[in-house]
Image: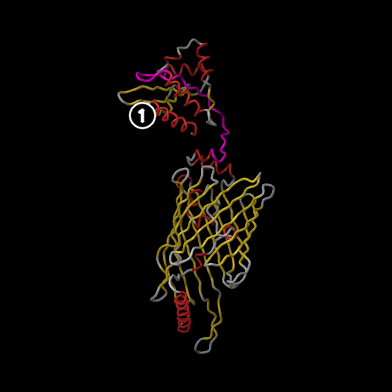
Amino acid sequence: MKNAKLIAALLLLAFHARGFCSGAGTTAAEFLRQDPTARGFSMGGVYLPLVNDGGAAYVDPAVLGGMTGHNVTLSAWKGLDGVSRYGFAGIVLNTGKVGAFGLNYLSYNSGSEDVYDLNGNLTNVTLEKDYAASAGWGRNLGEHLFFGGQVKSVNSKLAEAYTANAVAFDAGLMVKSLDDNFTIGAGVENFGGELKYKQEGDPLPRAVRGEAGYRFALGRDNVIIGAVVKKPYSENTLNGGAGVEYSPAALPVALRAGMRRVAGEISFAAGLGLNWKGLSLDYGFQPAGALGEAGQRLSLSMDFGPSSEAGRAEAFKNKGMKRKALAMGYEYTGPKIPVSVLQPQTGGGVTTEQATAIADAVRAALSRSQKLQLVAREQTEQILREQRFQYSVCGSSDCAVEAGKLLGVREIFSISVMRIQQRYALSIKIIDVETGAQESAYEDTAASVEKLYDLAVKYADKIALE
């Protein structure tokens, strides 16, 4: 043990001497800078526009907020020295409206060397062995905004004798378009403590990152492009990368390419992915550069739950993100509900023409619903007129139910608009024609008839998306 500690002391001396020669801004746990998956590695470090990706959720936990299923990701690769080894394992558990949780493990082993101690005995020593275990959570903060954070426990061991531990956190925020195609976000990495083996300590490789990406269709094929900029907290440099992924519709493959700039050196990478029913096997390659041998990554990713666009749209619908679901192509497949909107009941200060305009706005919004089958105003008036129904004066629930039965609809919308002192009041009631029960009601006031019109459109849109 004494000899092992001597070896470790020499390694520590070399470790800090290297940091001293590098000047200000040296950090420990450099393995935390590694790309966890072959997909992001071959795209120049681009992760944020990738959906349902466990590696992306580790890099920026805001991705957790936009995931719709569960995911397991495994990766393994060698370092540029050809000796050291890395490994990554990540699990994402989606809980719906509560958000998604991520558990990750990133490891590094520098390899071992035979070292002679002071007594001339040959000892095989693992020079450095590190790992980081993290737990994260993310969820949506609306239909455009997503947030996530994770806590890391970083552990390092030198020469099997000296250990150091630190706790760090990552956080991210991203904005997505409703159709999920455009993404922009920012985050922080590895902020927290420092690794201290003896008396001196070095901070973790903290950084601030910004990223943007866009997904689009090229005919029937899919393309993802993105770019990332990363500013190390304690270094006077700006790193970054850009990448592209092309997925032809005719084949279950993805072709990738990317470039990155790290510490002033530019490198290129390429990769290939094979996809089949939620199972992805990814490979990434980076040609040999000034830092050593060629870099390679191999990853296996498994999706459990909705991963297709239709499935993801359904999942967002179930989370209450209805506008996003529709923008992503959600289609209601159940039976449609026949409904009708009656002519509004009006009070003092509101003209018949104004009330009719509000009712027409409600009809226009309801007609966009995939779940409702709306009887047009002209048809409603004609049927009730033929039945000699007093259409223009129907204000009570019983009257609305009677009108609904004549129209043969399942739900009837009863609207009233009136002026009360200096305010205008709106009431929209949805009545079940069969039971006569009021299913829901929306009531509000506004300062003008124009604002009342906007309120009616807002509530009708909400009903249409339910």
Dominant secondary structure, magenta: loop
Question: Disc 1 designates what residue?
Answer: 446
Between 113 and 59, the residue placed more toward the observer is 59
Vertical relation: 172 (above or below) 115: above
Q: Nearer the viewer, residue 212 or 29?
A: 212
Residue 338, horizontal then vertical, whole percent: 53, 24
Q: Residue furthest top?
A: 388
The residue sitting at the left extreme is 421
Kind of residue indicated by mark 1: Ala
Is residue 62 depicted above or below 386 in this figure?
A: below
Residue 182: give x, y in percent of width and height. Answer: 53, 47
Crowdedness of circle 1 by 10 Å Cα count: few (<14), some, many (20+)?
some
Is residue 385 covered in magenta? no
Residue farthest to the right, as pictured: 250
Give the magenta range: 326-352
Give the side of residue 111 with respect to residue 391, left or right.
right
Residue 4, image x and y in percent? 48, 81
Side (left or right) of 353 relative to 271: left
Magenta-span inclusion, residue 343: yes
Residue at left offset 55%, top offset 80%:
124
Residue name at image x 47 percent, y 43 percent: 143
- Residue sitting at x 34%, y 18%: 348
Q: Position of residue 319 (x, y in %)?
A: 48, 42
Decide which of 269, 373 is in the foreground and name it.
269
Q: Secondary structure at mark 1?
A: strand
Q: Is residue 196 above or below residue 403?
A: below
